[in-house]
Image (spheres, rainbow, N blue to C red):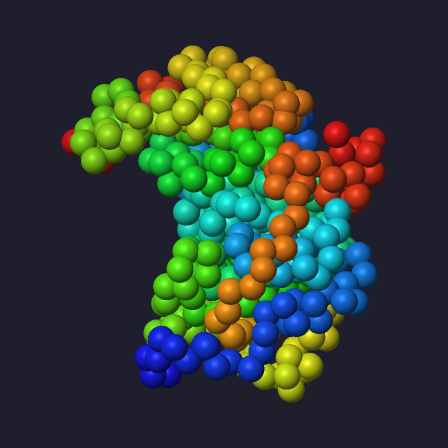
Amino acid sequence: MPDTVSWPDDIFDALTAADVRQVAYVPDAGHSRLIDRCLTDATKTCVPLTTEEEGVALLAGGWLGGERGVLLMQSSGVGNCINMFSLIQTCRFPLLSIVTMRGHWGEFNPWQVPMGQTTEASLKLSGSMIFEVEQPAEVGETVTAAARMAFEGPAAAAVLLSQRLIGAKTFGK
Amino acid sequence: MTDNLQRADAYPLRRREVVKKLLEDRGDTLVVAGLGAPNWDVTAAGDSPLNFPLWGAMGGAAMTGLGLALAQPDRRVLVITGDGDMLMGLGSLATIAGKQPRNLAIVVCDNERYGETGMQATHTAGKVDLTAVAAACGFPITETVADEAGLAEALPIIAGANDGPVFVTIKVRAENLPLDMPPKDGAYLKDRFRVALLGVDNAV
């Protein structure tokens, strides 16, 4: 990702302004710069996960203890979370997720397509609000808006970062 | 370990008594209970606002404990769960060991059965050793307890070791006991926990 791109820094600033302390993630190329920034910020605890549903339970526990968190994942990870989302809905926990989309626009790998095409519907069926963003200039304000509605709810709010924003991965093809 | 799917029928430790001992001197310990029998056991020992008993979210008890332990590093956090829940969240042992929270203890009451669904055997009735998995993931303190003497040795470690995280498997008899249920409204359970821990001004 070229240094001229600033939206990962805008996400970092929005999360910091929202007092997000726990950053749970399964890595994605689109989140790599944000993860690097979070790893070097002493106010945030970064928790790499083996599967995304762990992050849902982690952040529920964090909220029980008085801390705000965010779950960073790619669209395939949403499918791994479905039953654990019931914890959020039943208990009315906040859940702020930032999802990098795959299989959605110009995808070269067909194995990413089934989950990418159903990510938004899956989140909606699980009770999450959706904030899709395609324009780099709108990323920061979108995360700010979603964070406010997640933590003031409390409720589930997912920001979907479009593949048009991130750039479709090609592996040089 | 040989396969003997019925051996837990004869284990000497009884889960209600074990959990009662785990909690009788809990002080201000924060407790997360996994779904099913561990929830009923923790409730039978005495419902408390500082209990967060899960009625679902299978596989999520240990991670809920991690989030809580990271948010409250000066408080003791105790997760009491079952072998079925722990097996569903096996990867979380790797995640927790990666963070090394010193204030977190995970206790699995292992009856080698899915108790709520007809007592079908879990993988711990076969060759799976959850304590060995936790040790291999990097938990610094791990123990398997199978009798009263072992339990007496483990209790102070579970309650107080500050060089954790601690992981203890307690082999308990496979038995169906009366369902001792806490409130089941999840929003209420969450809010009462936060009010008790954080104060009402910070909680709701």
Spot occupied by residue A95 in the image (x, y as percentages of width and height):
55, 32
The front one of B163 and B143 is B143
Spot occupied by residue B32 in the image (x, y as percentages of width and height):
63, 53
Q: Residue furthest front?
A: B178
Which residue is at a point 44% across and 28% down the rendered structure image? A126
Which residue is at a point 61% across and 41% down the rendered structure image? B184
Which residue is at a point 63% across and 55% down the rendered structure image? B180
Which residue is at a point 57% across and 48% down the rendered structure image? B54
Tell me if I can see residue B44 in this picture: yes
- Left or right, residue B17 beside residue A141: right
- Left or right, residue B153 beside residue B110: right
Depicted A171 relative to depicted B20: above or below:
above
- Left or right, residue B133 beside residue B126: right
Spot occupied by residue B152 in the image (x, y as percentages of width and height):
69, 81
Tell me if I can see residue A2 in this picture: no
Quadrant location, the N terminus of chain A: top left
Depicted B19 relative to depicted A158: above or below:
below
Labels in figure, total = 0
The front one of B157 and B83 is B83
Depicted B92 relative to depicted A166: above or below:
below
Quadrant location, the C terminus of chain A: top left
